Image: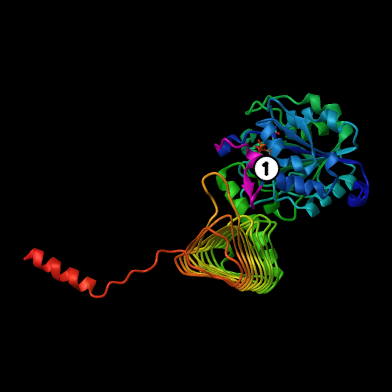
Amino acid sequence: VSKETKVGGGDLAIVIMAAGKGTRLKSRRPKVLHEIGGKPLLSHVIAAAKRIVPAADIFVVVGHQAERVKDAVAGTGVQFVEQAEQRGTGHAIQCAADAIKGYENVLVLSGDVPLIQTETIETLWKFHQVQHAAMTILTAVPEDPTGYGRVMRADGSSGTESAEVTAIVEQKDLKAEQHGVKEINSGIYVFQVKPLLEHLHKLTAGNRAGEFYLTDMAALLRAAGERVVAIEAADAAEILGANTIAELVALDQTMRMTTAKRLMAEGVTIFRPDTCVIDAEVQIAPDTVIEPFVQLLGKTTIGSECRIQSFSVLENCVLGDDVLVRQSCVMVGSKAANGAQIGPFSRLREGTELAEDVHVGNFVETKKAVIGRGTKAGHLSYIGDAEVGGGTNIGAGVITANYDGVRKSKTQIGNGVFVGSDSILVAPISVGDGALIGAGSTITRDVPANALAVGRARQVTKEGWAEFRRTQQKQTKE
Ligand code: UD1
Ligand code: CA
């Protein structure tokens, strides 16, 4: 899809400012790599930008820990611009001047304003075009404007679309009489590139922060006789920034609630959604029930009629329909087909694949284990690097000894096998279809189909011996 057909005319580049350190987070991690909804702030902003223009027209300004930031989003195909020294948002755009000079318009997004929706950007972009403005500012009137730059309108109003903007004043630089202005700058703007680049070099750092403020372009452009306008976002929550950990956590909560509401609208029941952690990309089919305190992370996909009980954590898992995950299971990179039952207290690690109607019970750990239809492993087992057929019974406490201290070996168990409780299968090993392994066996050699294998010391029984010993002990005491 070309950019023209997406937004209805006009030639547009997008610059995402992401070079800042995020001093107020007091973190070693750069601000834009802090996560909400399970993904870095910057990834959310890039995703929104990519719905407006192709990745080739998106320029991310990086600076603080540039390599780390680039690595984190390299897969998105966006371009990068370096701002080696971070001297303010105006300076960030100065660094991007060469990148954008061939375009007619530039949309500026902030890497730390991640909830912005495509529709809002499109409304801003259309308003900019209709208004023939040199600069169009996206604004909001939140309950508490503290900390944000304030938008000064020519008529002194807050949010009258027809009133032109005279200036943006940062919180630190507010004059006493300006504290009452409730309309804030979102940090999201569209500029006509020509007037922007004509006046961009005029920015000075003569403010409280000693930075080159992009926000000063409003007054600069107006002084040059250019038109500066602003449009208020429909929902102030979309443009909230993440400057502190508390703000990050609040945004995370908002985003997860949005995900939970989306899923509920699609027919999923989520009890106490405020206690669940559900990442943005999770998909769940209707009639599935999510109990309180569940975490569904990454690209987890869940079918219909499933139930995920409390305290279970699923990351990058795929469940079919009618799957029951009982309490306190930990599942990573695993698949479970229709009708599977898991837990309570099961741990399914990377590469586990359960076929239809498999039961995996309490304190069972699996890793790279492909388990066939209807097989049951009810209690206290480790099944790793294993292929297990269908209709097999894995007794309580069965262990696949897959590691000899140097390498990992495979265990193969056929269909309809009965592995007695507390057996150890020393890999590499294979057990044929229909075989039976006696409880407590240590199996070191392959077992053919339909055979009985017992590998344990023969039982010794001495009649009356226990009673004899008790009598002896009594006599010594006396
Ligand atoms: C900025 C606006 C403020 C607005 C708010 C909205 C300015 C001067 N102020 O303030 O009016 O209300 O956003 O969220 O622009 N960055 C760079 N290079 C730099 C400095 C910052 O790339 O040299 C990036 C940051 O990584 C961040 C974004 O620009 O993603 C905004 O910078 P930040 O310092 O958070 O600005 P605010 O103080 O929030
Ligand atoms: Ca900010």
Q: Quadrant of residue 188?
A: top right
Is residue 140 positioned above or below 199 on the image? below
Tell me the amino acid under the disc marked 1. Asp
Magenta-tinted stretch: 26-39
| Residue for badge 1 | 112
Along the viewing direction, whichever of 46 and 437 lies nearer the viewer? 437
Q: Can see residue 160?
A: yes
Query: Can I make out residue 154 in this image?
Result: no
Disc 1 C-beta below 8 A from ligand 1 = yes
Percent x, y of residue 196: 84, 32
Q: Where residue 310 sits: x, y (%)?
A: 53, 66
Which quadrant of the figure has residue 422? bottom left
Q: Nearer the viewer, residue 120 or 343?
A: 343
Displayed-image quarter of ligand 2: top right
Place of residue 232 in the rendered image (x, y in percent of width and height, measured from the top left): 76, 50
Q: From this view, report whether residue 35 is shown above or below residue 296.
A: above
Out of 99 and 237, give the one closest to the viewer.
99
- The kind of secondary structure element at disc 1 is loop
